[in-house]
Image (spheres, rainbow, N blue to C red):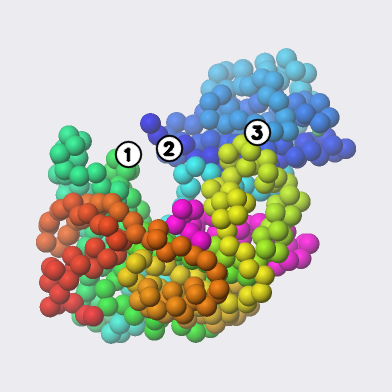
Amino acid sequence: MFDVNYKTVVVKCPNPSCMANIQLSIGKVPGGENDSGGWILECNKCHMLFPYAVKNPNDYSRVDHGATVLDSWDNEILGDKQEVIKKHNLESFPEDFRFDNLLYVETGEFERPKFSDIEENIFFCPECGTHIEPHVYSQLTHKLTSVNETIEGYMPYYLKGMLGDPDSIIILSDYQCSCEFKTKIVLYKSFKENELPIEDEHELILIDVIGAKLETNIDGIYNRDSCLQVLQKLLIRWQVYYNRVFLAVPFIGFDFKNREAQRVELWNWILKNTVPHKTTLLTRRATFNSFLEGSNNTGLDISVLKSYGLLNPTLSELTEKKALFKTDFHAKFYAGFDRMNSEVLVGSFNIHEGGYVENIHFKKYDFGDFFLKYILKMNIIFDPRFIDEEGEFLLIDESNKRVTIEKYNTSRRNKILEIINGIDNKDLPN
Ligand SMILES: [Zn+2]
Ligand SMILES: [Zn+2]
């Protein structure tokens, strides 16, 4: 019916001489009805009882391990909480008791980072060099009504099963810069009935600005935080525009004892920004092992997560040895590609946070060239057979008020460029 987001939370038992890890899975319906309430928990190690306030205690949330739920209350029911607390003789428990949440991994449908929330820009006007992204989004506000009307016109056909089963919505729109430069922009949104109409232009991902020169604009010295943002935007773009993502990264976070939490956070960052079946991660075995160790020491037991099926699939694939390990490499590159083309971010940047500066450069290759220069040179086995992706998208040509269902069998990008070249390529910059 609706999508439930699950968040894994690890809390420590409040008994100071116990401090056992208790792992909870908190389910929430984004934008829907969520009950507030709580549980009476019993620590499985020291058997201490304590109240724990939680969303949706009676349906979507649960304890995964470390404690047992003895009772629950619902804040909506008058006096329910007091009664339950009294029943278990826990009135002395301070009302404002706080637990230390150690770490969480979101599972199920992620709240994925919004493209437009990421500060660093990747699209610039090729004529005057201004940032295009803020202007695109402010212009979109005015276009949303007509886009929604077009989708509304399509829905009856969709619901009757008469016209396609799109996996996404692609919007082509005209864009004019204040310097008079004209081009087309490409926007993406996944097609989900319950997310329509589009309420906010920021639900759309700007996946392309035709003629923008990423090679020129993503090139130079950046601090690590900016590198992460540029990579994050590219990852969002690659997974819906191209098909596959390849990350070759020897180091993820620092291998110091006191940096464990940060290291685990960076791994979570990767998991959050990638789609497991589209991603290949090449790293040093030591990097992966130190992540496993770090996550154990910060309270998250990967093996437990795995056995409960909670683990993000990227990670469970890693543990099933689908990840590629290589001991002796120092090359770093991040690539998105389909059977025809590839885009690569290369430079000195490992996945790290902070103010240290690194050099990064954006490059484009046809796929064969990329395969020869990067994948083969790494001396690893990579099966290129599973590159193609098939599906269909709802194409809204916003400027020409046209809507069609388009099938693609290589990648969305390939199909979209074919369509753009077919419409009015005489006006477009190359
Ligand atoms: Zn305990
Ligand atoms: Zn301009």
Measure the C-alpha gap from mark 3 to mark 2: 20 Å
Q: Earlier in the sequence, mark 3 or mark 2?
A: 2
Residue type indicated by callout 2:
Asp
Give percent across and percent down for residue 94.
75, 31
Disc 3 on helix, strand or loop? strand
Looking at the image, how many numbered discs can be counted on the residues?
A: 3
The numbered mark, 1 or 3, whose residue comes first in the sequence reads 3
Q: Which structural element holds mark 2? A: loop
In percent of width and height, residue 388 lies at 34, 59
Disc 3 designates what residue? 64
Contact (CB < 8 A) between labels 3 and 2?
Answer: no
326 with respect to 333 (left or right):
right
Residue at point 62%, 64% (across, down): 325
Q: Position of residue 135 (x, y in %)?
A: 31, 69
Identify the element where label 1 is drawn: helix
**x, y percentage for residue 327?**
67, 70
User: Which kind of residue does numbered mark 3 sit on?
Assistant: Asp
Residue contact between numbered discs 2 and 1, judged by CB atoms under 8 Å: yes
Q: Write down the residue under mark 2.
A: 3
Picture quadrant of residue 372: bottom left
Q: Earlier in the sequence, mark 2 or mark 1?
A: 2
Quarter that holds the C terminus: bottom left
Q: Which residue is mark 1?
A: 194
Q: In the displayed structure, would residue 90 be above or below residue 150?
A: above
Q: Where are the magenta residues, as a range? A: 251-280
Q: Residue at x 62, y 51 (%)?
A: 319
Looking at the rendered structure, the kind of residue marked 1 is Asn
